[in-house]
Image: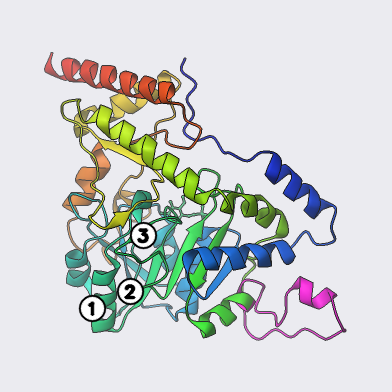
Amino acid sequence: MANIEFYRHQLGDEEFEAVREVLNSLFLTTGPRTAQFEKEFAEFLNTKHALGLMSCTHALELAVEGLGISAGDEVIVPSLTFMATANAVARLGGTPVFADCEADTGLLCARSVESLITKKTKAIIPVHLYGALVDMHAMRDLADRYTLKLIEDAAHCIEGERDGYKPGQLGDAACFSFYATKNLTCGEGGAISTNHDDLAAWLRSARIHGMSCDATRRHSGAFKHYDQEFVGTKANMNDLQAALLLPQMKHIATRRAERERLAHLYETKLQRIADVDFPKIPTGCISAYHLQTAWVPAQLRDTVVMDLRNEGIGAAVNYRPVHTLSAWKNRHDCVRIPLPNTERICASTITLPLYPGLRDDELNTVVDVFEASLHKAKQQIAA
Ligand SMILES: Cc1ncc(COP(=O)(O)O)c(C=O)c1O
């Protein structure tokens, strides 16, 4: 057995020490570490505001609500994504409408989005899939022409850039994930960034029930009664999460560079194998290299994934087309057009282990097992 996991985190001594300091301090909830993380994260993204949350799912839901989307409104989302993108709209009473992706990149297709815009459309949620940014100039242009909000699902893309812009710079808000397998992780966590002062102020209160001040402000300084201005949720990041994240901020550039090196190594080796292809990274795009995917003939895909798993290699499928899942497939209000690129890519995609710390010899083993399995599966089909 190879024992090459899908993901291995890189949390170590620095994070232990940072968490120990929080445990020795007064505040376990949103306090000075969260504030420090928010400051560093906003600086890194070059956006005015960043707020720490419990997850990217919370970030998406808060963005949808905070930008005024409600029951009866339509929001265009890709189907080639994790279900959280569509759920955020539906849970707020809106209707997610699924658009197709570009054939070569897997990223949300501007032409498909435009074909779905109706009088009820209020927003678009592009997903920066696998770490590569969607063409946000095209999305911004659509949003401006049709007066729509633009929410970026940047769960895969903290470190990416395209034509000089970063996630959150062209959208009204961008949503990030620090889930267990993400490039920056605290197990579960998320953030939202925005350049809108009014949205940031609303989010700061909405993430803590709509209260007028958070725990730190309630318990320090002179006594003051709290008020509740509206009905919010409970999604504030705590200082334990921030303590895990802060040391990782120092390593963002080197770890992204190592992901890029490993991704190039994979592609050099995999492109020698017949019938294997990859999503293209658009020209002008610096990917965050969150996931390494390879496309194989659809009829062989599941066999190859199973073989890799049986050999102890953490392969996965990112993603099944959301519009074909049981919760959505009969929702004719959401599934309005055929999505051929999405269905083709989702039927052929395999995700292979990719993370700093993956050794070159392990990567070679992954490729060897992948190639042998593909070869065997082809022979079985031919027989
Ligand atoms: C594209 C995408 N959006 C949203 C999410 C939700 O992130 P979280 O688990 O932090 O809520 C994920 C999680 O994997 C994701 O991949």
Name the amino acid type tagged 2. Glu
Q: Residue at x 46, y 56 (%)?
A: 158
Badge 1 element: loop
Image side of residue 236 versus residue 315, left or right: right
Would you name the residue on which mark 2 appears?
74
Q: In which quarter of the image is the C terminus?
A: top left
Overall secondary structure of the magenta section: loop
Would you name the residue on which mark 1 appears?
118
Can see residue 60?
Answer: no
Would you name the residue on which mark 3 appears?
161
Judged from this view, the residue extending furthest toward the left is 382
Q: Which residue is drawn at 33% across and 65% down?
A: 164
Measured in 3D between alpha carbons, the distance from the residue under mark 1 to the one under mark 3, in whole angstroms, is: 30 Å
State which tag comes first along the sequence, 3 or 2.
2
CB within 8 Å, label 2 to label 1: yes
Q: Give the range drawn in magenta.
A: 205-231
Ligand 1 has an atom within 8 Å of the beta carbon of the residue at disc 1: no
Residue 171 on image: x %, y %: 38, 73
Q: Which colour scheme is used?
A: rainbow
